[in-house]
Each structure stands twice: as structure tokens, then as C-alpha cells.
Amino acid sequence: MRSNKLLKIMYVFTWLAFIGLCIQSGILLTSYFFSFSNPEVSKTLFGGINLFQYYNYSFYHYSFILFYKIMIGISQASIAYLLIRLLKDLDIANPFNKSVCKLMKQTSISILCLWFIVMLHNTHIQFIGKKYNFEMDLYSSEFLFVSGVLFIFSQIIKRGIEIQQENDLTI
């Protein structure tokens, strides 16, 4: 009973995270379009991000850096949505089912893609930032570890499903 309450609370928090990440990505995209006519917008992007140095150096690099940030937000929102679906489908009485395993694998792959985008962003920022002594705002890169852990758990659940099906056949 306590686990069900905890899962319901996590379900609500995951929805809040999903909505917040969608809003963040939307604000960054809107700010990008406003920065076409007013470069000052690039000084005060969502979350205190200041890309004015990059904007002055090259609009091309500024666009790519902001594109990375938008894609990271969208990727995080899609992962939150997968978690919403996972929490919705999860039955604590029977946690070993194919939909849970499938959603865990999809989440693992999505986190791996997020890691790839983060590495592209960080590499680009470091290349330009070190070359021209710009301020660097890097993302953490432990997504690869999280993706691996989640993939391992999905394989454990997959094996649990196989054992459960074997037991059902022998009865």
C-alpha cells in the first residue's frame, strides 16, 4: 500500500517535471526568435543563460549552442514522458510485464541519446570558449552511467518475465 502511494506521488512529480521541461524548451525557442531582432535577448535567456559573447562572435555558433540547449530540454521532456507512461503502466502487484520492460529500454535509449547531445554541446562550448576565452556553461555527463543502469534493470525485468512465463507453462 505504501509503495502505491509513493508511485502516485512520483507520477505527479514526473508530470510537473514534464510540463516544466516543455515550458523551458518553449521559452528558449521563443527567445531565439526574439534574438533575431534584438541581440540583447541573448544576455538573459531562461535560467540565467548568457550567450551574448557567442552571439557577438558568430550568430552561427550562437544558433548551434542554443539548438543544443533546446534539444537537451526536449530530450529531457521526452524522458519524463516515458517515465509518466512507465509509472502509469506499472502494477506493483505484477511488476514484471512486457510494457514495463519496453518502456525501460526506450528510456535507456533516450538517456543515451541525451548523453550524446550533451557531449556535442560540451565539446562545442569548450572548443569556442577556450579559443576565445568565453564563459563556459557545461552540462554534467553522467547520463551514460544512468542509461547503463537503466538498461541493466530492463534486462533483469526481461529475465523476470521469461521466468514468470516458464512458471505459468509448468503449472
Image (cartoon, rainbow, N blue to C red):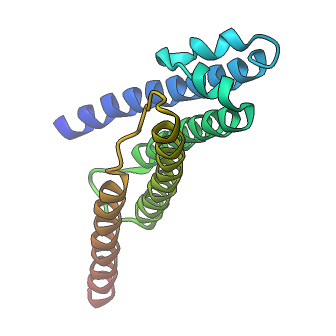
Q: On screen, 1 above or below 145?
A: above
Residue 1 visible, this orientation: no
Residue 125 in the image, given as x and y percentages of width and height = 51, 40
Q: In the figure, is residue 43 to the left or right of 135? A: right
Q: Residue at x 41, y 59 (%)?
A: 104
Q: Front-most of 134 and 94?
A: 134
Residue lying farthest to the bottom in this orientation:
170
Q: Quadrant of the C terminus?
A: bottom left
Question: Going 42% across and 59% down the picture, which residue do you hit?
Answer: 108
Q: Is residue 42 above or below residue 7?
A: above
- State the image coordinates of residue 47 (x, y, percent, origin top left): 48, 17
Q: How many marks?
A: 0
Of residue 45 and residue 168, the one placed in the foreground of this image is: 45
Q: Residue at x 60, y 37 (%)?
A: 65
User: Residue 137 sits in which quadrant?
Assistant: top left
Quadrant for the N terminus in the image: top left
Q: Residue furthest left?
A: 2
The picture places residue 154, in percent across and down from the top left corner, at 34, 66
Q: Residue at x 50, y 55 (%)?
A: 110
Answer yes or no: is residue 117 visible: yes
Asked if residue 161 lies left or right of residue 41, the reply is left
Considering every residue shown, the one lying at the far front of the view is 132
Frontmost residue, 10 versus 66: 66
Look at the picture and state if 71 lies above or below 18: below
